[in-house]
Amino acid sequence: RCREVSWARSVYKRQQFTVYTTENTQGRLVSDTVLSVVEDSKGTLWLGTTQGGIITFDSQSKSFSNKTIQEKSIRATGINFIWNILLDEDNLWAGTLFEGLFKLDRNGKVLEHYQSDDKNPATLPSNYIYRTLDDGLGNLWLGTMDGLSILNKRQKTLKHVALPDKPPNNNTAYNITSLFMDSLWRVWVGVQGEGIYVFHRDGSFITCLLYT
């Protein structure tokens, strides 16, 4: 069953930052809107942006490099709007706003591509991929605009995860805004307007916390 919880505000100490913009990098940072940042084992930052696709930043040389997704059949708007990036060994996964999920090599070559198809329930529930999470068992948890899915990377199959405590005829699309796995291997799923749902890694439900 779901539980109701209250939230308290936290106060953070102000820190000093170096700011990089399109203007002060002479356009090498293609977009000023960065939605995702991850660091690889070599210290390179991979940035997901809204207009420039995937950009890397070398923290030693302070240089930027564009890693455009190499897929001519897909409209530029879709592949240039990257909601999130997840590094996976020598590859990376990119969740986009319009074109679903991509598995890429480090040069932007498309290795796998997953999209939504209304006529095929075995596909993604939405092409808007807001969050990705590797559960350490060979699966990617995908938070989309229309619900939660789990991708088995080896079998390349998708399983949709329903939110408990919802009537079976409820057709509301649930926007998954955050994914997090804690030290006990529980997956915490943030849902816009609904609260937090907690699952085991096998997709079985534990509990949910509703905002009051």
Image (cartoon, grey):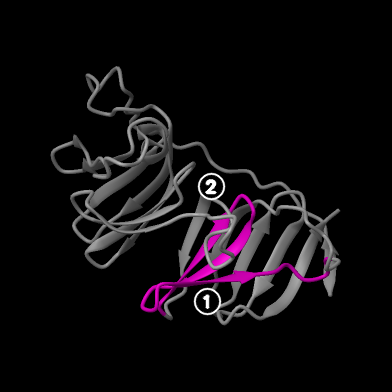
Q: Quadrant of residue 210?
A: bottom right
Q: Total marks drawn?
A: 2
Which kind of residue does numbered mark 1 sit on?
Answer: Ser
Q: Residue 90 or 117: which is nearer the viewer? A: 117
Element at badge 2? loop
Mark 1 against mark 2, which lies toward the viewer?
2
Residue 66: x %, y % from top left: 22, 37
> Residue at 18% across / 50% down in the picture?
107
Q: Residue 3 or 172: which is nearer the viewer? A: 172
User: Magenta stretch: residue 150 in it?
Assistant: yes
**Earlier-in-chain disc, 1 versus 2:** 2
Q: Say if 198 sits above or below 148 in the image.
A: below
Q: Say if 207 sits above or below 114 in the image.
A: below
Which numbered dot is residue 129? Answer: none
The magenta-colored residue range is: 138-166
Residue 127: x %, y % from top left: 52, 49
Residue with the mark numbered 2 = 128
Q: Quadrant of residue 117?
A: bottom right
Element at badge 1? loop
- Residue sitting farthest toward the front: 119
Q: Say if 206 sits above or below 18 in the image.
A: below
Q: Residue 139 or 9: which is nearer the viewer? A: 139
Packing grade of label 2 (10 A; few <14, some 14-19, many >=20) is many
> Residue at 40% across / 72% down in the picture?
156
Query: Mark 1 and mark 2: span between their CA atoms?
Result: 28 Å
Q: Residue 126 or 181: which is nearer the viewer? A: 126
Residue with the mark numbered 1 = 183
- Residue sitting farthest toward the left: 61
Packing grade of label 1 (10 A; few <14, some 14-19, many >=20) is few
